[in-house]
Image (cartoon, helix red, strand yellow):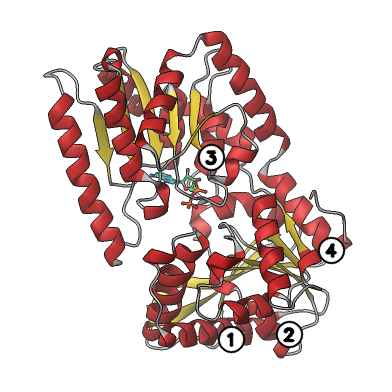
């Protein structure tokens, strides 16, 4: 089998494989354990200048090849164009986006630098799989250096309607660069439709048929085992005892403005306001470690949440019950898995999300004998697969409150039936099938599912 070369903005820390690994490393585990592979990308370190040649670390059949980013490249490519412009636009948030011509130049420069460092490592029969919006122009840069390998691209975040994407300065260059890939994967049929429209609108009709939906998934069996094992540990016992028999609703997110956290907190407040019978009967635990804390919007979000949580707790708390527990420190993944199994409700309400793995993890973590209810945003890619969830509009705090009321009042039989449907979905589409489907489309020209 030919070698697989994965390229992503960040290369995972080799020590983080297994239970603590992030979503992408979990998703790609199947791909890298079945064949020789290289994982190429940014080390996470900054230096005076971006490295011209990668540092390599060999772990069995997998070689990690990393480069450092120069300080200006980090600012312009990563913080500026990727996080400041692309991230909000791709999540339908034109108004939050910040554009700067220098950031765009830095973005192109770093994509070219990735290509220049990667090209000499490539063998003629390698398969190259590029991940996510940081590297929209990489396939074109590799082609410009004469690379003829099969190149796939997968976009982990949503692709908005073409009129929204057109608001991004240099949108057309980005779409033209994407055309250099042989297969372009996105999360859902909606994303695929939007991206095809955008390509057709700029005269790239011949690229549109390369776009297909491959909904990303989790290691369902692995997460279920982790949750069951962690359920009987001291940390989870501590939480269980502290609830004193009350229901637990849980939210687990990076602290990001796409995750709908203020609306979610407001929704929980509305539940207590409009449905007094739930007061002192349910506790909401939100774990939201700070991410991108050096970006102004994220600091403002944190202040807003601090204030909202304080206000709702002040208004409804009893001497022996506080409505919201809000943790901005990181909590270990295995512990989160145990918490999810304990929670009667998984509250997952992003304003827009490519997929949302937390929703799938919540389903996988449940006890089949007594499963909880998923209250899920209609605007998460996961909503298309998890039709047993109580779907809500994440912008509407009253709708979230209604969803929570339905979930808290749901008879055990309905809870079980809804969960069975969702469990079947997360068992049939897993991280391993996702990898295989994408690579089959890229390497064998297999028909994608849409
Ligand atoms: P995103 O990639 O936008 O952060 P996803 O829900 O798709 O959102 O994936 C997030 C991954 O990170 C999941 O595997 C989830 O378990 C993990 N994660 C998110 N927030 C936390 C947290 N607060 N603590 C531990 N793990 C988290």
Whichever of labels 2 and 4 marks the residue nearer the N terminus, that label is 2
Residue plotted at (65% across, 75% down): 175
Label 3 – label 2 distance at C-alpha? 38 Å
Q: Is residue 80 left or right of residue 194?
A: left
Write down the residue under mark 3: 378
Label 1, on which residue?
A: 112
Name which residue lies at 14% across and 19% down. 318
Does label 3 or label 4 sit earlier along the sequence? 3
Classify 138 as above or below 315. Answer: below
Between disc 4 and disc 1, whose residue precedes?
A: 1
* Depth order, front residue of 229/356: 356
Residue on which the image places disc 2: 143
Q: From mark 2 to mark 4, how far is it between C-alphas?
A: 18 Å
Judge the density around disc 3: few (<14), some (14-19), many (≥20) Cα neighbours within 10 Å: many
Separation of residues labelled 3 and 4 (CA atoms): 33 Å
Q: Is residue 85 left or right of residue 448?
A: left
Location of residue 253 in the rendering, given as x and y in whole percent from the top left corner: 40, 45
Residue at 30 percent across and 59 percent down: it is 298
Seen from the viewer's position, the closer of residues 181 and 408 is 408
- Spatial separation of the CA atoms under disc 4 and disc 1: 25 Å
Counting from the top left corner in percent of width and height, residue 382 is at: 59, 41
Q: Are marks 3 and 2 in contact (CB under 8 Å)?
A: no
> x, y percentage for residue 350?
45, 45
């Amino acid at each position: 089998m030919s070698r697989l070369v994965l390229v992503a903005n960040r290369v995972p820390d080799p020590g983080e494989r297994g239970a603590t690994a992030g979503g992408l490393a979990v998703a790609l585990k199947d791909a890298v354990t079945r064949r020789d592979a290289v994982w190429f990308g940014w080390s996470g370190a900054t230096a005076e200048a971006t490295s011209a040649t990668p540092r390599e670390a060999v772990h069995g059949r997998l070689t990690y090849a990393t480069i450092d980013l120069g300080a200006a490249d980090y600012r312009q490519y990563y913080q500026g164009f990727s996080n400041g412009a692309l991230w909000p636009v791709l999540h339908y948030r034109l108004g939050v986006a910040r554009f700067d011509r220098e950031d765009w130049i830095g973005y192109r420069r770093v994509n070219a630098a990735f290509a220049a460092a990667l090209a000499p490592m490539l063998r003629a029969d390698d398969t190259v799989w590029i991940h996510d919006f940081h590297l929209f122009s990489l396939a074109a840069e590799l082609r410009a250096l004469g690379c003829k390998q099969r190149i796939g691209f997968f976009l982990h975040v949503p692709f908005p309607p073409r009129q929204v994407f057109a608001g991004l300065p240099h949108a057309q260059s980005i779409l033209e660069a994407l055309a250099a890939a042989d297969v372009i994967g996105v999360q859902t049929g909606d994303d695929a439709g939007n991206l095809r429209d955008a390509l057709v609108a700029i005269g790239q009709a011949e690229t549109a048929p390369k776009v297909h939906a491959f909904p990303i998934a989790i290691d369902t069996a692995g997460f279920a085992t982790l949750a069951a094992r962690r359920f009987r540990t001291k940390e989870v016992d501590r939480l269980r005892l502290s609830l004193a028999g009350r229901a637990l609703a849980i939210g687990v997110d990076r602290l990001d403005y796409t995750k709908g956290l203020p609306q979610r907190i407001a929704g929980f407040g509305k539940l207590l306001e409009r449905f007094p019978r739930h007061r002192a009967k349910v506790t909401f635990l939100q774990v939201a470690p700070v991410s991108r804390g050096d970006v102004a919007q994220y600091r403002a979000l944190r202040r807003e949440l601090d204030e909202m949580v304080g206000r709702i707790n002040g208004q409804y708390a009893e001497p022996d019950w506080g409505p919201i527990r809000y943790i901005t420190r990181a909590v270990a993944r295995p512990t989160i898995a145990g918490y999810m199994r304990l929670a009667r409700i998984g509250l997952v309400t992003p304003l827009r999300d490519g997929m949302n793995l937390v929703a799938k993890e919540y389903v996988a973590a449940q006890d089949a004998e007594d499963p909880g209810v998923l209250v899920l945003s209609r605007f998460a890619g996961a909503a298309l697969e998890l039709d047993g969830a109580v779907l809500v509009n994440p912008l509407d705090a009253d709708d979230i409150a209604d969803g929570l009321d339905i979930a808290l009042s749901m008879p055990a039989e309905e809870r079980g039936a809804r969960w069975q449907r969702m469990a079947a979905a997360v068992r049939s589409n897993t991280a391993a099938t996702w990898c295989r489907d994408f690579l089959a489309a890229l390497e064998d020209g297999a028909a994608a599912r849409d």
